[in-house]
Image: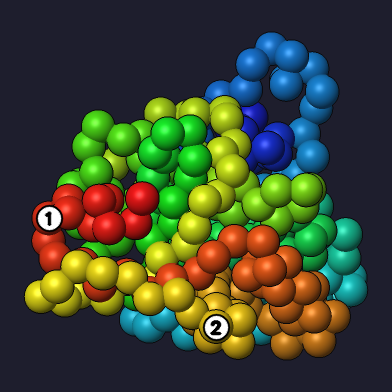
């Protein structure tokens, strides 16, 4: 049995698996803890095995109550069972390709359950020690924004890690990447603004109203639940973000002129 101790955001997670391939992939995805962090022990445990289900066919996630009071998330290529305390997750995968999606599902549910924050479909950049989120669906330009922002540090190019708990909304380094590898930056940066991407022939921005901001954030979240209590937690988190951070629609071309427009 392989055992890997990982750091995701501010959280210490121990992951176990009997698969050498999964273990190797975990080592590539997640930075190891410092000795001090390791001595503190893990907050969560993910038990991961392969041999479940069928190859990926669609993004639809089915949700059911767990036998122990927890919750079960299932897709054709993975199943995630979280215990009632949202501390232990049993992940069953069809193959290594399902690993990232299953962990995003489990970890995202834990963040919302504990009202710490959430995972957002967005790229995230640092400029002058402040974080900027660029939210968008697949193909909207998240990775393009990250590529065009060099030499600014990239905290996320696909799935951003947003901390809402605390006085200030902050963003941290996300290991859930599509192309640009994480450097394991341990710092959380105050979030300056959230931009919803809109490819355009012109460059400009429009401030969204409170109601529009809420809808924009909700539309780009990784969230699956049929529990009204979890939904209410999520709404509180979103309301807190939109109360403290401006949300704007960003019209951008495929060049770096948008940085001049948003400063």
Q: Is residue 251 left or right of residue 185?
A: left
Q: How is the image coloured?
A: rainbow
Q: Is residue 103 visible?
A: no
Q: Which residue is mark 2?
A: 209
Q: Which residue is mark 1?
A: 255
Return the x and y of residue 170 as percentages of the image width and height. Answer: 61, 47
Q: Residue sitting at 77 percent across and 73 percent down?
A: 236
Q: Nearer the viewer, residue 25 or 104?
A: 104
Give the quadrant of the N terminus.
top right
Q: Nearer the viewer, residue 79 or 252?
A: 252
Query: The residue tagged with tag 1: helix, strand or loop?
Result: loop
Q: Is residue 222 visible?
A: yes
* Circle 2 or circle 1, nearest the eye: 2
Disc with the residue nearer the chain's start (2 vs 1): 2
Q: Nearer the viewer, residue 170 or 48?
A: 170
Q: Residue sitting at 70 percent across and 48 percent down?
A: 168
Q: Residue sitting at 80 percent across and 80 percent down?
A: 232
């Amino acid at each position: 049995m392989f055992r890997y101790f990982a750091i995701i955001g501010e959280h210490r997670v121990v992951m176990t698996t009997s698969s050498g391939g999964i273990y190797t992939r975990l080592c590539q995805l997640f930075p190891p803890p410092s000795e001090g962090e390791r001595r503190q022990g893990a907050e969560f445990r993910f038990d991961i095995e392969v041999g479940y289900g069928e190859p990926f066919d669609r993004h639809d996630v089915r949700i059911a109550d767990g036998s122990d009071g927890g919750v079960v998330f299932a897709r054709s290529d993975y199943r995630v069972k979280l215990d009632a305390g949202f501390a232990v997750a049993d992940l069953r995968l069809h193959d290594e390709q399902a690993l990232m999606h299953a962990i995003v599902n489990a970890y995202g549910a834990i963040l919302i359950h504990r009202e710490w924050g959430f995972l957002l479909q967005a790229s995230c950049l640092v400029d002058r020690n402040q974080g900027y989120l660029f939210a968008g669906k697949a193909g909207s330009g998240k990775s393009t924004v990250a590529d065009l922002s060099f030499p600014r540090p990239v905290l996320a190019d696909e799935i951003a890690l947003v901390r809402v708990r605390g006085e200030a909304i902050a963003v941290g380094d996300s290991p859930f990447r599509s192309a640009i590898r994480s450097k394991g930056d341990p710092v959380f940066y105050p979030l300056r603004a959230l931009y919803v991407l809109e490819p355009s022939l012109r460059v400009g921005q429009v401030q969204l109203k409170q109601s529009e901001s809420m809808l924009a954030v909700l539309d780009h979240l990784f969230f699956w639940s049929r529990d009204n209590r979890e939904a209410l937690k999520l709404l509180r988190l979103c309301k807190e973000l939109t109360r403290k951070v401006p949300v704007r629609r960003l019209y951008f071309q495929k060049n770096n002129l948008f940085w001049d427009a948003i400063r």
